[in-house]
Amino acid sequence: MSEGIHRSHPDIVKRLKRAQGHLAAVLAMFEAHRPCVDLAQQLHAVESAISSAKRELIHDHIEHCLSDTAETGTAEAGGNSLAELKQLAKYL
């Protein structure tokens, strides 16, 4: 697989497109002056969907890219993997 594309990416794109559609529906709810409790509930669902997609992307990257790099067995690769993991951790 090429460096920037993982097997999980098409599924993540589908999730994000569903979230995008859901967000558009929430915007319509705002325009229709729906109750705040309904709006908050639907925004929470959109936020959860996006969070789930982000988590899947990070987990997939850790599983495939970082473990592949670490398996090369060089100190440099291991150091790069650790630095990248630390960088990713701030997004969890």
Image: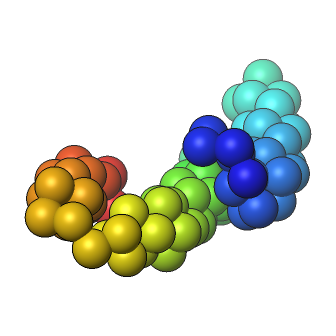
Q: Is residue 47 left or right of residue 31?
A: left
Along the viewing direction, whichever of 53 and 36 lies nearer the viewer: 53
Pinpoint residue 38: horizontal percent, then vertical percent: 68, 55
Name the colour scheme.
Answer: rainbow
Residue at (83% x, 42% y) in the render = 17
Q: Is residue 21 left or right of residue 62?
A: right
Residue at (78% x, 38% y) in the render = 20
Q: Is residue 58 left or right of residue 1?
A: left
Q: Is residue 68 above or below residue 39?
A: below
Along the viewing direction, whichever of 3 and 38 lies nearer the viewer: 3
Quick check: can you spot residue 15? Answer: no
Residue at (49% x, 75% y) in the render = 63
Pinpoint residue 3: horizontal percent, then vertical percent: 60, 43
Which image quadrant for residue 4? top right
Pinpoint residue 10: horizontal percent, then vertical percent: 83, 52
Q: Quadrant of the C terminus?
A: bottom left
Which image quadrant for residue 28? top right
